[in-house]
Every structure is written in structure tokens, then in C-alpha cells.
Amino acid sequence: MKERVTKLKLYASVLVKKIVFAWQTETAYAGNTVGELLSTVFYNITFLAFIDVILKKLKLIAGYSFPDMLVLTLISQTVFYAGLPNIHLHLGRTLYKKRSRWLVRYATSETRLRIVSGNDTGHTTIFRRVFFHSPFADIYFLSHSAKRFSSINVWADCGYWWLNYGNSLPALFQIRFCYAGFQK
Amino acid sequence: MKSPYIQGLKQGFAEISVYSVDFLLGLIQSAAVVGFEIILWTFVLPSDSHSALLERTSYFLIATGIALIIGGARYRFGRELILAIKEGTLSFHLLKPIIPLLYIYSEHLGGQATDLFTGAIFIFVGALWVPGFSWLTLSLFLLMLITAFINTSALNIMCGSVAFWTTEATGIRNVFNQVTRLLSGQQIPLNIFLEILPKFWSQFFCILPFASVAYTPTMLIMAKSTTDIDYRFIISSLIWAIILPITANLIWKRGLRRYEGTGN
């Protein structure tokens, strides 16, 4: 028991040191910290202006109204800053190694989430490059970010397509989804 | 003896021409992105007439093409400057008997051959669907293209110069990028965006330099007659083409005084 407590204390102290170190690294350049904050503020302003213009012409986007979009923006930003896609990716990769069929789907769906959301550094497919800069990426990511906590099966299915049909089909799936999602 | 700037241009081009597939992918990427923009706005602004659809397609093709040609798409020149300052490669240029900014720009321009080529195609295809333009609109378009280039280059230099004060300047570059994308009319046709804003903000955004990056030249080439021309944008572009280069030059020079380079 005493050994376990000592071990836990050690883990806790390593964790605290890691957090402190990460904080120091991230805030080493005060100018960039301010820049990143401004970037987030301007990203949200420009994105919401973009959504506002669209909603002046359409009733809903993918079934969501402007207040819904505000909530989804908050969730997507929280997800982005909390690094949840990364955590899920690590979990997915670990599970992938176990070679369970469902888990393979799960892992690939997370990879795909990173590609669609633009929060990806390891993939250089043309589709990632296209979607990162397309307005569909944001809308698609937003419309799914709320659901992904409760409905992982949706992602599992997406991952299945990704796994079986390579890169092209999910891209076409996204277009079809966005097309169906717009309600006039 | 060849000019160092021409050599820089060739070197930049040589670097990207090594990967010929990337050249093609860059073209496909830009075409797909502008294609998605057109599809999106076709849903948002449905119209029964074929001419309205063509007009919108022309708008996005020309606006994106102009932004690609003048380097106003993603502040890539600004990024080159940030990297040169951050990694210290600026020291190499400062030691040589050249104008550092011009040399970095020429090297950067050579590497942007894909964007230049894609932009030229977009403008050409977009202009094919424009009903017709007068000599006045064409001359104003060429003039605005020059002012767009001056303003964009100055904005890029200002964005890059931030790295003199803070080594990591990607956050500020993102701000420039996001604001320019929205207010230059690349993301939303600017006339539609200004329509929904209160009068004060709509007039304020008219006088900012960002519209000159893509919207002003596009508006001119698409004007059916001289009555369609909004002269506020032209006047503000011309004024900014004087103010911005002077400001950018001052900031660059002030920043250079802070620069510390070490060699080995």
C-alpha cells in the first residue's frame, strides 16, 4: 500500500511538472500568446459573421439555427483547445493495435475527424488540404462536434467507409451530407 | 552578371519544380476550393437565372485568381519573412549587397509559380463569362490590380515584421489572414456582407485596405456599366497604396534595429 502511494505521488509530481513545463513552453513568447488570443477572437468573429450572412439567406444550416451555431462554436473551440481530438486519436491508435474490428473503425474515424476539422499534421492528402480551406469543413465539423460525445457510432461508420474506400469516398460523403443538411 | 533577384526567382521556381505532381495538386486544390465556394453560395443564394449563376461563378473565380496572383490569399510572403527573422536566415541577406526584402520576395515569387499559374487561369475563365467591359473599367481594373499588389505586399511586410518584436508570430499572421479573407470578399461577396451590416460598419469596412486585395478589382471587371462602379473602394485603394508602403517601410526599418543575428 505504501509503495502504491509513493508511486502515485511520483506520478502526480511528474504530471504537475509536465503541466508547468507545457505552460512555460506555450507562454514563452508573450507576443505570440496575445497573437493566439487575438487569432481565436478574430476566427470566431469572422466565422460567426460568415454564418450570419448565410443564415440571412437560409433558415437553418444542417438543421441548426444561429443560437445553436453559437453553442456549437463554443463546443468546437473547447474541444479544439482541450485537445480532445488528440486524446481520442491516441486512444484510437492504442485500440487499433488490438485489431478488433469495431475498434479499427473507431480509430480511423478519429483520424478522419482530425482531417475534416483541419486539426491534422500527419496527413497530406489532397482532400485534407481542400477541406481545410473550404467552408464545408467548418460547418461539417461544427454540426458534428456536439454529437460526437454521445454518438460515436456515427463516427465508427464514417471510419468504416474511410477504411474500406480510401480517401475519396468520405470526401464525397461529406459533400452529400452538406447538400442534404442545408434546409431552405 | 545576372541580377541576384532573377537568380532568387529561378531558385524559388527550381525548388517547387522538383515536385511536378505537387504543382498539379496545387492547381486541383485551388480549383476544388473555389468550386466548393461556388457550390456553397449556390445553395445560399439560389437563383433561377443562368446569368446570375454565371456571374457568381465569375466573381469567385476572379476574386480568388486575383488574391492568388498578388499573394493576398494566405499571407505566404509574410510567413517567409517571419521564418527568415525567426530562424536567422535574414542575416545572410543583410550581409549581401542586395535589398533583403526584394530578394526574399523574388525567391518567394519563384516558389509561387503554381499560384500565379492557377490565378491567371481563374481570371481568364472568370472573365470569359463577364458580359463585356469598357475601356474605362479595364483601365481602372489594371490600375486597381497594381494598387492591390502594393497594398497586399505592404500588409505582408507588416505581418512579417511582427516577428522582430515576438519571435513566434503565427497567431498575428492568422489574424491578418482571417480578417483579410472576410473583408476582401474572398469568403463572402463583399456587397452581400456589407448589406447586412449597420451603416456605420458597412462604411467603415469600405475604407479599410482589405477590400483592395480582391473585391475592388473584381468589382471593376464585373461592372456592366460605369454606374455599377463604387468609387469609394477605388479612392480608398489609391489612398492606402500611398499610406501602407510608407508604414510598412517604417515598421520594417524600426524592426531591423531590434534584429540580432549570430553567425558561425
Image (cartoon, coloured by chain):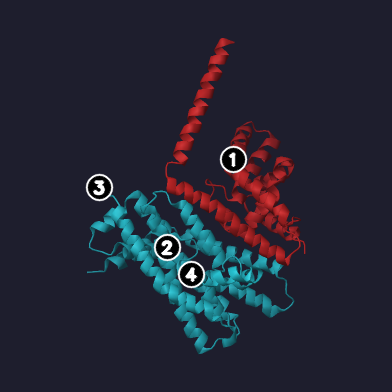
Chain colours: A red, B cyan
- Which disc number belongs to residue B263? 3
Q: Position of residue A18 (x, y in %)?
A: 49, 31
Task: Assess whether mark 4 and mark 3 are in contact (beta carbons under 8 angstroms).
Answer: no
Q: Position of residue B13 (x, y in %)?
A: 38, 63
Chain of the residue where label 3 is placed in the rendered structure: B
Q: Which of the two marks, 3 or 4, is nearer to us in this view?
A: 4
- Which disc number belongs to residue B156? 2
Marks 1 and 4 sit apart, C-alpha to C-alpha, by 36 Å
Marks 2 and 1 sit apart, C-alpha to C-alpha, by 31 Å
Chain of the residue where label 4 is placed in the rendered structure: B
Question: What's under tag 3, amino acid-wise?
Answer: Gly
Q: Which residue is drawn at 59% across and 59% down?
A: A46
Please rate how many residues cluster around mark 3, counting C-alpha atoms within 10 Å: few if below 14, some from 14 to 19, many from 20: few
Question: What's under tag 2, amino acid-wise?
Answer: Asn
Residue B59 picture quarter: bottom right
Secondary structure at badge 3 equals loop
Residues at marks 2 and 4 on the same chain: yes
Q: Quadrant of the N terminus of chain A?
A: top right
Q: From this viewpoint, is residue A131 visible?
A: no
Marks 2 and 4 sit apart, C-alpha to C-alpha, by 13 Å
Q: From this viewpoint, is residue B180 visible?
A: yes
Residues at marks 2 and 1 on the same chain: no
Residues at marks 3 and 2 on the same chain: yes
User: Among all residues in the image, which is located at the extreme bottom?
Assistant: B135
